[in-house]
Amino acid sequence: MAIAMNDVRTFDNTGEPEGVKTPRKAAFASWIGSAVEYYDFFIYGTAAALVFGKIFFPTIDPKLATVAAFATFGVGYVTRPIGAFFMGHIGDKFGRKKVLTFTLLLMGISTFLIGLLPTYNQVGIAAPIMLVVLRLLQGLSAAGEQAGANSMTLEHAPAHRRAFFTSFTLSGTQMGFILATLVFLPIASLPEEQLLSWGWRIPFFLSAIVVAVGFWVRRTLPETPAFKEEANANATVELPAAVLFRDHTPAVLRVVFGALVSVTSTIFGIFVLSYAVNTVHIPRTTMLTLLVCANIVALAAIPLWAMLSDKVGRRPIFIFGALGCAVLIWPTLWAISRGDLMLIFVFGLLTSGIVYSAANAVWPSLYGEMFDTRVRLSGMAIGTQIGFALGGFAPTISAAIMGEGINGWMPVAGLVSAASVIAAISIFTAPETYKVPMHELGKKKNKVGA
Protein backbone atom coordinates (compact mmCIF):
# COMPACT_ATOMS: atom_id res chain seq x y z
CA MET A 1 0.00 0.00 0.00
CA ALA A 2 1.52 3.30 -1.09
CA ILE A 3 0.48 6.06 1.33
CA ALA A 4 2.84 9.01 1.51
CA MET A 5 3.99 10.59 4.78
CA ASN A 6 2.67 13.93 3.53
CA ASP A 7 -0.83 12.54 3.11
CA VAL A 8 -2.73 15.74 3.81
CA ARG A 9 -6.26 16.05 2.53
CA THR A 10 -8.78 18.83 2.77
CA PHE A 11 -12.52 18.62 3.17
CA ASP A 12 -15.25 21.25 2.92
CA ASN A 13 -17.52 22.12 5.83
CA THR A 14 -19.74 19.10 5.13
CA GLY A 15 -16.87 16.63 5.38
CA GLU A 16 -16.77 16.15 1.61
CA PRO A 17 -13.58 16.22 -0.52
CA GLU A 18 -12.84 19.64 -1.97
CA GLY A 19 -12.84 20.11 -5.72
CA VAL A 20 -15.13 20.81 -8.63
CA LYS A 21 -18.02 18.37 -8.80
CA THR A 22 -20.12 17.94 -11.93
CA PRO A 23 -22.98 15.74 -10.71
CA ARG A 24 -25.28 16.36 -13.67
CA LYS A 25 -22.58 15.70 -16.25
CA ALA A 26 -21.39 12.62 -14.38
CA ALA A 27 -24.95 11.33 -14.07
CA PHE A 28 -25.64 11.88 -17.77
CA ALA A 29 -22.37 10.25 -18.80
CA SER A 30 -23.17 7.26 -16.58
CA TRP A 31 -26.72 7.14 -17.90
CA ILE A 32 -25.80 7.10 -21.57
CA GLY A 33 -22.82 4.79 -21.04
CA SER A 34 -24.97 2.29 -19.18
CA ALA A 35 -27.64 2.57 -21.87
CA VAL A 36 -25.04 1.70 -24.50
CA GLU A 37 -23.51 -1.15 -22.49
CA TYR A 38 -26.82 -2.73 -21.62
CA TYR A 39 -28.36 -2.23 -25.03
CA ASP A 40 -25.57 -4.50 -26.19
CA PHE A 41 -26.01 -6.87 -23.26
CA PHE A 42 -29.80 -7.14 -23.56
CA ILE A 43 -29.97 -7.65 -27.31
CA TYR A 44 -27.90 -10.76 -26.65
CA GLY A 45 -30.40 -11.92 -24.03
CA THR A 46 -33.35 -11.33 -26.35
CA ALA A 47 -31.62 -13.14 -29.20
CA ALA A 48 -30.79 -16.03 -26.84
CA ALA A 49 -34.45 -16.34 -25.88
CA LEU A 50 -35.85 -16.13 -29.42
CA VAL A 51 -33.19 -17.12 -31.95
CA PHE A 52 -29.88 -18.62 -30.80
CA GLY A 53 -31.20 -22.04 -29.86
CA LYS A 54 -32.43 -22.50 -33.43
CA ILE A 55 -29.38 -21.21 -35.34
CA PHE A 56 -26.47 -22.22 -33.11
CA PHE A 57 -27.86 -25.51 -31.66
CA PRO A 58 -30.22 -26.81 -34.37
CA THR A 59 -29.23 -30.48 -34.08
CA ILE A 60 -30.40 -31.10 -30.50
CA ASP A 61 -33.79 -31.40 -28.83
CA PRO A 62 -35.57 -27.99 -28.75
CA LYS A 63 -35.71 -27.91 -24.94
CA LEU A 64 -32.01 -28.71 -24.70
CA ALA A 65 -31.32 -26.10 -27.38
CA THR A 66 -33.09 -23.53 -25.21
CA VAL A 67 -30.99 -24.56 -22.22
CA ALA A 68 -27.83 -24.29 -24.35
CA ALA A 69 -28.81 -20.84 -25.66
CA PHE A 70 -29.46 -19.63 -22.12
CA ALA A 71 -26.12 -21.12 -21.10
CA THR A 72 -24.35 -18.91 -23.66
CA PHE A 73 -26.13 -15.98 -22.02
CA GLY A 74 -24.93 -17.19 -18.64
CA VAL A 75 -21.28 -17.59 -19.64
CA GLY A 76 -21.12 -13.83 -20.02
CA TYR A 77 -21.31 -13.79 -16.25
CA VAL A 78 -18.39 -16.22 -15.87
CA THR A 79 -15.83 -13.57 -16.83
CA ARG A 80 -17.55 -10.91 -14.72
CA PRO A 81 -15.80 -11.82 -11.44
CA ILE A 82 -12.47 -12.08 -13.28
CA GLY A 83 -13.09 -8.77 -15.04
CA ALA A 84 -14.12 -7.21 -11.72
CA PHE A 85 -10.65 -7.77 -10.24
CA PHE A 86 -8.99 -6.39 -13.38
CA MET A 87 -11.32 -3.40 -13.84
CA GLY A 88 -11.39 -2.68 -10.12
CA HIS A 89 -7.60 -2.56 -9.99
CA ILE A 90 -7.44 -0.10 -12.89
CA GLY A 91 -10.25 2.07 -11.56
CA ASP A 92 -8.95 2.31 -7.98
CA LYS A 93 -5.31 2.78 -8.95
CA PHE A 94 -5.50 4.85 -12.15
CA GLY A 95 -8.94 6.43 -12.14
CA ARG A 96 -12.61 5.86 -12.86
CA LYS A 97 -12.54 7.47 -16.30
CA LYS A 98 -10.03 5.01 -17.78
CA VAL A 99 -12.23 2.06 -16.84
CA LEU A 100 -15.34 3.65 -18.35
CA THR A 101 -13.64 4.29 -21.69
CA PHE A 102 -12.22 0.77 -21.95
CA THR A 103 -15.46 -1.02 -21.03
CA LEU A 104 -17.48 0.95 -23.55
CA LEU A 105 -15.18 0.10 -26.47
CA LEU A 106 -14.81 -3.57 -25.52
CA MET A 107 -18.56 -4.08 -25.28
CA GLY A 108 -19.20 -2.31 -28.59
CA ILE A 109 -16.62 -4.29 -30.55
CA SER A 110 -17.72 -7.63 -29.09
CA THR A 111 -21.37 -6.96 -29.85
CA PHE A 112 -20.73 -5.86 -33.43
CA LEU A 113 -18.71 -9.02 -34.09
CA ILE A 114 -21.57 -11.22 -32.83
CA GLY A 115 -23.66 -9.81 -35.66
CA LEU A 116 -21.05 -11.07 -38.14
CA LEU A 117 -20.97 -14.66 -36.85
CA PRO A 118 -21.76 -17.57 -39.15
CA THR A 119 -24.42 -20.04 -37.97
CA TYR A 120 -24.05 -23.73 -37.09
CA ASN A 121 -25.33 -24.78 -40.51
CA GLN A 122 -22.53 -22.75 -42.12
CA VAL A 123 -19.45 -23.67 -40.05
CA GLY A 124 -20.61 -26.31 -37.58
CA ILE A 125 -19.40 -26.37 -33.98
CA ALA A 126 -17.11 -23.38 -34.59
CA ALA A 127 -20.17 -21.11 -34.62
CA PRO A 128 -21.28 -21.63 -30.98
CA ILE A 129 -17.63 -21.60 -29.88
CA MET A 130 -17.11 -18.14 -31.41
CA LEU A 131 -20.40 -17.01 -29.89
CA VAL A 132 -19.25 -18.06 -26.43
CA VAL A 133 -15.88 -16.29 -26.83
CA LEU A 134 -17.53 -13.00 -27.76
CA ARG A 135 -20.05 -13.41 -24.96
CA LEU A 136 -17.15 -13.83 -22.53
CA LEU A 137 -15.70 -10.53 -23.75
CA GLN A 138 -19.08 -8.88 -23.22
CA GLY A 139 -19.05 -10.12 -19.65
CA LEU A 140 -15.52 -8.80 -19.11
CA SER A 141 -16.72 -5.38 -20.20
CA ALA A 142 -19.88 -5.38 -18.09
CA ALA A 143 -17.80 -6.24 -15.03
CA GLY A 144 -16.37 -2.75 -14.84
CA GLU A 145 -19.12 -0.64 -16.40
CA GLN A 146 -21.66 -0.31 -13.61
CA ALA A 147 -19.11 -0.21 -10.79
CA GLY A 148 -17.11 2.44 -12.64
CA ALA A 149 -20.15 4.52 -13.50
CA ASN A 150 -21.56 4.20 -9.98
CA SER A 151 -18.26 5.22 -8.38
CA MET A 152 -17.90 8.16 -10.74
CA THR A 153 -21.42 9.44 -10.09
CA LEU A 154 -21.37 8.78 -6.33
CA GLU A 155 -18.15 10.75 -5.92
CA HIS A 156 -19.44 13.69 -7.98
CA ALA A 157 -22.83 13.83 -6.24
CA PRO A 158 -23.84 16.24 -3.43
CA ALA A 159 -23.78 14.52 -0.04
CA HIS A 160 -27.54 14.71 0.47
CA ARG A 161 -28.44 13.45 -3.04
CA ARG A 162 -26.04 10.58 -3.64
CA ALA A 163 -28.74 7.98 -4.22
CA PHE A 164 -30.60 10.18 -6.68
CA PHE A 165 -27.63 10.96 -8.90
CA THR A 166 -26.15 7.47 -8.66
CA SER A 167 -29.49 5.95 -9.68
CA PHE A 168 -29.02 7.37 -13.18
CA THR A 169 -26.65 4.47 -13.88
CA LEU A 170 -29.56 2.07 -13.40
CA SER A 171 -31.94 4.32 -15.33
CA GLY A 172 -29.44 4.01 -18.18
CA THR A 173 -29.58 0.25 -17.81
CA GLN A 174 -33.36 0.37 -18.18
CA MET A 175 -33.04 2.58 -21.26
CA GLY A 176 -30.60 0.08 -22.74
CA PHE A 177 -33.21 -2.63 -22.22
CA ILE A 178 -35.90 -0.44 -23.81
CA LEU A 179 -33.72 0.33 -26.83
CA ALA A 180 -32.80 -3.32 -27.26
CA THR A 181 -36.42 -4.44 -27.06
CA LEU A 182 -37.72 -1.68 -29.33
CA VAL A 183 -35.14 -2.64 -31.94
CA PHE A 184 -36.18 -6.30 -31.64
CA LEU A 185 -39.92 -5.59 -31.90
CA PRO A 186 -40.00 -5.11 -35.69
CA ILE A 187 -37.31 -7.79 -36.07
CA ALA A 188 -39.39 -10.31 -34.10
CA SER A 189 -42.39 -9.71 -36.38
CA LEU A 190 -40.42 -10.88 -39.42
CA PRO A 191 -41.26 -14.27 -40.93
CA GLU A 192 -39.33 -17.03 -39.17
CA GLU A 193 -37.02 -17.67 -42.14
CA GLN A 194 -35.97 -14.02 -42.43
CA LEU A 195 -35.60 -13.65 -38.65
CA LEU A 196 -33.25 -16.62 -38.46
CA SER A 197 -31.24 -15.80 -41.58
CA TRP A 198 -30.47 -12.07 -41.37
CA GLY A 199 -32.99 -10.23 -39.20
CA TRP A 200 -31.42 -11.08 -35.83
CA ARG A 201 -28.12 -9.51 -36.94
CA ILE A 202 -29.46 -5.95 -37.33
CA PRO A 203 -29.62 -5.06 -33.60
CA PHE A 204 -26.00 -6.14 -33.17
CA PHE A 205 -24.83 -3.98 -36.07
CA LEU A 206 -26.71 -0.96 -34.70
CA SER A 207 -24.61 -1.12 -31.54
CA ALA A 208 -21.81 0.68 -33.41
CA ILE A 209 -23.94 3.85 -33.47
CA VAL A 210 -24.80 3.89 -29.79
CA VAL A 211 -21.20 3.12 -28.80
CA ALA A 212 -19.98 6.12 -30.78
CA VAL A 213 -22.48 8.36 -28.99
CA GLY A 214 -21.48 7.05 -25.57
CA PHE A 215 -17.76 7.47 -26.25
CA TRP A 216 -18.29 11.08 -27.37
CA VAL A 217 -20.14 11.91 -24.15
CA ARG A 218 -17.64 10.27 -21.81
CA ARG A 219 -14.42 11.60 -23.29
CA THR A 220 -14.75 15.04 -21.60
CA LEU A 221 -15.94 13.83 -18.18
CA PRO A 222 -13.52 14.94 -15.40
CA GLU A 223 -12.14 12.58 -12.77
CA THR A 224 -13.85 12.73 -9.36
CA PRO A 225 -12.61 15.04 -6.54
CA ALA A 226 -12.46 12.07 -4.14
CA PHE A 227 -10.17 10.06 -6.41
CA LYS A 228 -8.06 13.12 -7.28
CA GLU A 229 -7.41 13.72 -3.59
CA GLU A 230 -6.32 10.12 -3.12
CA ALA A 231 -4.02 10.37 -6.13
CA ASN A 232 -2.59 13.79 -5.19
CA ALA A 233 -1.85 12.56 -1.66
CA ASN A 234 -0.23 9.38 -3.05
CA ALA A 235 -2.86 7.47 -1.07
CA THR A 236 -3.95 5.08 -3.79
CA VAL A 237 -3.01 1.48 -3.03
CA GLU A 238 -0.81 -0.81 -5.09
CA LEU A 239 -3.13 -3.81 -4.75
CA PRO A 240 -6.70 -2.59 -4.15
CA ALA A 241 -8.09 -6.13 -3.99
CA ALA A 242 -5.69 -7.09 -1.19
CA VAL A 243 -6.71 -4.06 0.88
CA LEU A 244 -10.35 -4.72 0.06
CA PHE A 245 -10.35 -8.26 1.45
CA ARG A 246 -8.19 -7.28 4.40
CA ASP A 247 -10.46 -4.44 5.55
CA HIS A 248 -13.85 -4.95 3.89
CA THR A 249 -14.60 -8.67 3.56
CA PRO A 250 -17.98 -8.46 5.37
CA ALA A 251 -19.07 -5.65 3.05
CA VAL A 252 -18.02 -7.63 -0.03
CA LEU A 253 -20.07 -10.61 1.15
CA ARG A 254 -23.09 -8.38 1.77
CA VAL A 255 -22.83 -7.07 -1.77
CA VAL A 256 -22.45 -10.59 -3.21
CA PHE A 257 -25.63 -11.82 -1.53
CA GLY A 258 -27.46 -8.55 -2.02
CA ALA A 259 -26.78 -8.76 -5.74
CA LEU A 260 -28.81 -11.99 -5.89
CA VAL A 261 -31.88 -9.77 -6.18
CA SER A 262 -30.83 -9.50 -9.84
CA VAL A 263 -32.27 -13.00 -10.34
CA THR A 264 -35.65 -11.26 -10.68
CA SER A 265 -34.33 -9.22 -13.61
CA THR A 266 -32.74 -12.09 -15.51
CA ILE A 267 -35.75 -14.35 -14.98
CA PHE A 268 -38.21 -11.66 -16.03
CA GLY A 269 -36.21 -10.46 -19.02
CA ILE A 270 -34.94 -13.78 -20.37
CA PHE A 271 -36.71 -16.86 -18.98
CA VAL A 272 -40.18 -15.31 -18.88
CA LEU A 273 -39.85 -14.21 -22.50
CA SER A 274 -38.91 -17.70 -23.63
CA TYR A 275 -41.52 -19.42 -21.44
CA ALA A 276 -44.36 -17.16 -22.57
CA VAL A 277 -43.47 -17.37 -26.28
CA ASN A 278 -42.25 -20.94 -26.66
CA THR A 279 -44.35 -22.78 -24.05
CA VAL A 280 -47.54 -20.76 -23.56
CA HIS A 281 -47.43 -19.48 -27.18
CA ILE A 282 -48.09 -15.85 -26.40
CA PRO A 283 -47.02 -13.75 -29.43
CA ARG A 284 -43.42 -12.51 -29.38
CA THR A 285 -44.45 -8.92 -29.98
CA THR A 286 -46.88 -8.99 -27.04
CA MET A 287 -44.20 -10.08 -24.58
CA LEU A 288 -41.62 -7.68 -25.98
CA THR A 289 -44.17 -4.88 -25.60
CA LEU A 290 -44.64 -5.86 -21.96
CA LEU A 291 -40.90 -5.71 -21.38
CA VAL A 292 -40.74 -2.24 -22.94
CA CYS A 293 -43.65 -1.00 -20.82
CA ALA A 294 -42.14 -2.42 -17.63
CA ASN A 295 -38.87 -0.66 -18.27
CA ILE A 296 -40.59 2.61 -19.12
CA VAL A 297 -42.34 2.40 -15.75
CA ALA A 298 -38.97 1.63 -14.16
CA LEU A 299 -37.45 4.74 -15.75
CA ALA A 300 -39.93 6.83 -13.77
CA ALA A 301 -39.83 4.72 -10.61
CA ILE A 302 -36.05 4.48 -10.15
CA PRO A 303 -35.32 8.19 -9.48
CA LEU A 304 -38.38 8.41 -7.20
CA TRP A 305 -37.25 5.46 -5.10
CA ALA A 306 -33.73 6.95 -5.02
CA MET A 307 -35.01 10.33 -3.80
CA LEU A 308 -36.97 8.56 -1.06
CA SER A 309 -33.79 6.70 -0.11
CA ASP A 310 -31.99 10.03 0.32
CA LYS A 311 -34.69 10.91 2.89
CA VAL A 312 -35.27 7.66 4.81
CA GLY A 313 -32.20 5.50 4.12
CA ARG A 314 -30.95 2.81 1.77
CA ARG A 315 -31.83 -0.35 3.69
CA PRO A 316 -35.63 -0.07 4.01
CA ILE A 317 -36.09 0.70 0.30
CA PHE A 318 -33.85 -2.15 -0.85
CA ILE A 319 -35.41 -4.67 1.54
CA PHE A 320 -38.91 -3.68 0.45
CA GLY A 321 -37.96 -4.21 -3.19
CA ALA A 322 -36.32 -7.59 -2.58
CA LEU A 323 -39.13 -9.02 -0.46
CA GLY A 324 -41.74 -7.61 -2.85
CA CYS A 325 -40.12 -9.51 -5.72
CA ALA A 326 -40.09 -12.70 -3.64
CA VAL A 327 -43.87 -12.44 -3.33
CA LEU A 328 -44.91 -11.02 -6.71
CA ILE A 329 -43.03 -13.48 -8.89
CA TRP A 330 -45.70 -16.08 -8.02
CA PRO A 331 -48.78 -14.28 -9.42
CA THR A 332 -46.68 -13.04 -12.35
CA LEU A 333 -45.70 -16.54 -13.52
CA TRP A 334 -49.17 -17.86 -12.66
CA ALA A 335 -50.76 -15.26 -14.97
CA ILE A 336 -48.36 -16.16 -17.78
CA SER A 337 -49.09 -19.88 -17.40
CA ARG A 338 -52.81 -19.10 -17.86
CA GLY A 339 -52.17 -16.80 -20.81
CA ASP A 340 -54.19 -14.02 -19.15
CA LEU A 341 -52.83 -10.96 -20.94
CA MET A 342 -54.43 -8.38 -18.64
CA LEU A 343 -53.02 -9.99 -15.48
CA ILE A 344 -49.68 -10.55 -17.19
CA PHE A 345 -49.39 -6.82 -17.81
CA VAL A 346 -50.66 -5.87 -14.31
CA PHE A 347 -48.31 -8.17 -12.41
CA GLY A 348 -45.46 -7.70 -14.88
CA LEU A 349 -45.51 -3.92 -14.54
CA LEU A 350 -45.91 -4.13 -10.76
CA THR A 351 -43.09 -6.65 -10.29
CA SER A 352 -40.49 -5.49 -12.77
CA GLY A 353 -41.46 -1.86 -13.25
CA ILE A 354 -42.21 -0.74 -9.68
CA VAL A 355 -41.19 -3.14 -6.92
CA TYR A 356 -37.91 -4.43 -8.39
CA SER A 357 -37.04 -0.79 -9.17
CA ALA A 358 -36.90 -0.08 -5.43
CA ALA A 359 -33.91 -2.37 -4.95
CA ASN A 360 -32.48 -1.42 -8.33
CA ALA A 361 -32.58 2.31 -7.57
CA VAL A 362 -30.82 2.00 -4.23
CA TRP A 363 -28.06 -0.54 -4.69
CA PRO A 364 -25.63 1.75 -6.61
CA SER A 365 -25.38 4.12 -3.64
CA LEU A 366 -25.90 1.42 -0.99
CA TYR A 367 -23.02 -0.73 -2.23
CA GLY A 368 -20.71 2.19 -3.07
CA GLU A 369 -21.13 3.68 0.38
CA MET A 370 -19.93 0.46 2.03
CA PHE A 371 -16.35 1.16 0.86
CA ASP A 372 -13.81 3.96 1.11
CA THR A 373 -12.46 5.72 -1.98
CA ARG A 374 -9.28 3.61 -2.19
CA VAL A 375 -11.20 0.39 -2.88
CA ARG A 376 -14.70 1.56 -3.83
CA LEU A 377 -14.64 0.48 -7.46
CA SER A 378 -13.04 -2.86 -6.62
CA GLY A 379 -15.53 -3.53 -3.84
CA MET A 380 -18.53 -2.74 -5.98
CA ALA A 381 -17.22 -4.59 -9.03
CA ILE A 382 -16.10 -7.76 -7.27
CA GLY A 383 -19.11 -8.00 -4.97
CA THR A 384 -21.76 -7.31 -7.59
CA GLN A 385 -20.19 -9.39 -10.33
CA ILE A 386 -19.92 -12.51 -8.19
CA GLY A 387 -23.57 -12.05 -7.22
CA PHE A 388 -24.60 -11.23 -10.78
CA ALA A 389 -22.70 -14.29 -12.02
CA LEU A 390 -24.91 -16.46 -9.83
CA GLY A 391 -27.98 -14.60 -11.08
CA GLY A 392 -26.85 -14.80 -14.68
CA PHE A 393 -27.30 -18.55 -14.74
CA ALA A 394 -30.81 -18.29 -13.31
CA PRO A 395 -32.45 -18.62 -16.78
CA THR A 396 -30.36 -21.73 -17.47
CA ILE A 397 -31.23 -23.24 -14.09
CA SER A 398 -34.89 -22.33 -14.61
CA ALA A 399 -35.03 -23.99 -18.01
CA ALA A 400 -33.54 -27.12 -16.45
CA ILE A 401 -35.85 -27.26 -13.38
CA MET A 402 -38.98 -26.22 -15.23
CA GLY A 403 -41.68 -28.80 -14.62
CA GLU A 404 -44.30 -30.21 -16.94
CA GLY A 405 -47.86 -29.00 -17.23
CA ILE A 406 -49.58 -25.76 -16.33
CA ASN A 407 -47.88 -25.52 -12.91
CA GLY A 408 -44.40 -26.30 -14.18
CA TRP A 409 -43.33 -22.72 -13.41
CA MET A 410 -43.48 -23.19 -9.62
CA PRO A 411 -39.83 -24.31 -9.13
CA VAL A 412 -38.76 -21.18 -11.01
CA ALA A 413 -40.83 -18.96 -8.72
CA GLY A 414 -39.28 -20.72 -5.74
CA LEU A 415 -35.79 -19.97 -7.09
CA VAL A 416 -36.58 -16.25 -7.46
CA SER A 417 -38.13 -16.07 -3.99
CA ALA A 418 -35.16 -17.77 -2.33
CA ALA A 419 -32.64 -15.47 -4.04
CA SER A 420 -34.65 -12.35 -3.15
CA VAL A 421 -35.03 -13.32 0.52
CA ILE A 422 -31.29 -13.98 0.80
CA ALA A 423 -30.62 -10.54 -0.69
CA ALA A 424 -32.98 -8.88 1.80
CA ILE A 425 -31.37 -10.64 4.78
CA SER A 426 -27.90 -9.66 3.60
CA ILE A 427 -28.75 -5.97 3.36
CA PHE A 428 -30.59 -6.07 6.70
CA THR A 429 -27.16 -6.71 8.28
CA ALA A 430 -25.53 -3.75 6.49
CA PRO A 431 -24.84 -0.33 8.05
CA GLU A 432 -27.09 2.59 7.12
CA THR A 433 -24.97 5.16 5.29
CA TYR A 434 -27.24 7.78 3.76
CA LYS A 435 -26.15 10.47 6.26
CA VAL A 436 -22.47 9.50 6.41
CA PRO A 437 -20.02 12.05 4.86
CA MET A 438 -17.88 10.85 1.96
CA HIS A 439 -14.61 10.77 3.91
CA GLU A 440 -16.18 8.53 6.60
CA LEU A 441 -17.65 5.96 4.21
CA GLY A 442 -16.23 2.49 4.62
CA LYS A 443 -14.81 3.18 8.09
CA LYS A 444 -15.18 0.54 10.77
CA LYS A 445 -16.98 2.90 13.15
CA ASN A 446 -20.12 2.77 10.97
CA LYS A 447 -22.06 0.13 12.90
CA VAL A 448 -24.72 -2.17 11.51
CA GLY A 449 -28.08 -0.49 11.48
CA ALA A 450 -26.59 2.91 12.39
Image (cartoon, rainbow, N blue to C red):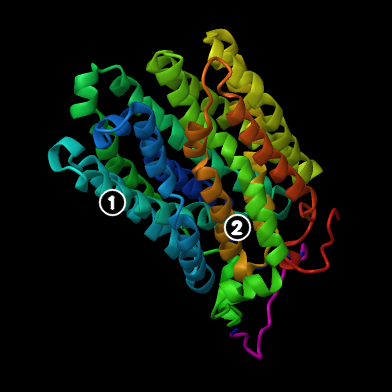
Residue range corresponding to the magenta coloring: 2-14
* Residue projecting furthest to the left: 122
Most foreground residue, 238 or 330? 330
Up the image or down, 200 lies above or below 332; here it is below
Q: Are marks 1 and 2 in contact (CB under 8 Å)?
A: no
Magenta stretch: helix, strand or loop mostly: loop
Q: Position of residue 329 (x, y in %)?
A: 63, 26
Evaluate whether residue 19 shows in this view.
no
Residue 109 is labelled as 1
Residue kind at label 2, given as amino acid type = Gly
State yes or no: residue 3 in magenta.
yes
Q: Position of residue 54 (x, y in %)?
A: 28, 29
Q: Mark 2 points at which residue?
A: 383
Evaluate whether residue 260 shows in this view.
yes
The quadrant in which residue 317 appears is top right
User: The residue tagged with tag 2: helix, strand or loop?
Assistant: helix
The quadrant in which residue 64 appears is top left
Quarter holding the N terminus is: bottom right
User: The residue tagged with tag 1: helix, strand or loop?
Assistant: helix
Residue kind at label 1, given as amino acid type = Ile
